[in-house]
Amino acid sequence: MKTEILSELRASGQYVSGQQLCERFGVSRTAVWKAVNQLKKEGYEIEAVQNRGYRLVSVPEILSQKELESIRKTKWLGQKIFYYEELDSTNSAAKKLAEDGAPHGSVVVTETQSAGRGRRGRSWASPRGTGIFMTYILKPEIEPANASMLTLVMAMAVAKGIGNMTGIRAAIKWPNDVIADGKKICGILTEMSAQVDYVNYIVIGSGTNVLTESFPPELEGKAASLYMISGKKFHRAELIEEINEQFERYYNVFMETQDMAKLQEEYNQLLVNCGEKVKVLGAREEYEGTAQGITARGELIVDTWEARKLVASGEVSVRGVYGYV
């Protein structure tokens, strides 16, 4: 009931009469009044005027099931949202949910993670009330070899979503980091369960630093948050919805060809070190060259003094010659 009333007040933007809400949801005026008062206690500022009804004045910075559901505009992504106050890892929870039958497009969100994970087994700090920690559950009909490219699609969605909502210019550090002001603001981890020629499910987790005010000494100069960059406090739920909308759009384009062919040009525009010197750190070799964008298969093109090389994501890291970017 609270979610439905919140959605209705949001959609209207004006006063909505109590009678309208009663008829819309088939409940009594008392039930509407109780739901509105519960929303007020949770921090929503709702104005009530006799003979006019209720109007949503302001929304608190809050993550909750009803907040995320009430602002959803996507067509298929997020039709099912799983919200938790705390998880060990959204990716771990998403994998269990996927195995238990959670539908394609489900979104797992938590306020904090006790064992957040990044790429190559690294831990990911997830302090309560500061970031976006979420995972998508996808069950696409694609070749397993094409799944890793969805990391690039997610990076585009995060960078575009941040830019649209905050005005901060976010860029991509291939393959799975989003940066702003030369520092990491988001990491992405994609995992898959598959047969030889069939994908059971893919989970794409992302951790975005939104309201963090400081980082431990070992991360200073490497990590930042949207608040630290702009001095502004953004609503995480609204940013989640913006990222969801962008991912749904990019994903639909990706599925037309099951590669980056139609997204390649835009991705390269977002690639922070396109045209810059980079250092490729692989398990068997290290070399330097100039990044020249990505192929339609999502490989990073690196020109060295002796040859043009194509770098697949796997267990390879790419750094700037003189630092992280």
Image: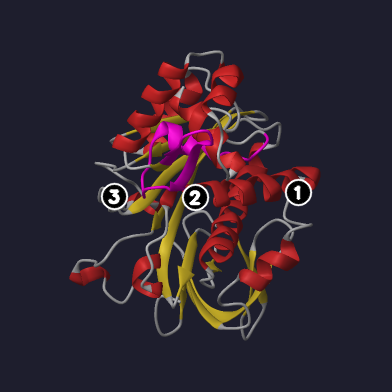
Range of residues picked out in magenta: 47-75
Gap between marks 3 and 1 measured at Cα: 33 Å
- Residue 286: in magenta span: no
Which corner quadrant of the image does residue 32 belong to? top left
Asked if residue 54 shows in the view, the reply is yes
Rendered residue at 64%/83% (across/down): 306
Give the camera-side residue of 108 and 205. Answer: 108
Which residue position holds label 3? 129
Rendered residue at 31%/77% (across/down): 221
Q: Is residue 311 above or below residue 56?
A: below
Q: Of helix, strand and loop, which one carries label 2?
A: helix
Rate crowding at label 2 as few (under 14), some (14 to 19) or many (20 or more) other CA atoms within 10 Å: some
Q: Position of residue 8 (x, y in %)?
A: 57, 33
Which residue position holds label 2? 238
Q: Nearer the viewer, mark 3 or mark 2?
A: 2
Q: Is residue 257 above or below residue 142?
A: below
Rendered residue at 41%/47% (across/down): 59
Which residue position holds label 1? 253
Indicate which disc, 3 or 1, sits on the residue closer to the N terminus: 3
Give the camera-side residue of 295 and 264. Answer: 264
Q: Of helix, strand and loop, which one carries label 3?
A: loop
Say what amino acid the circle numbered 2 marks. Answer: Glu
Q: Position of residue 300 (x, y in %)?
A: 62, 66
Outermost residue to the front: 51
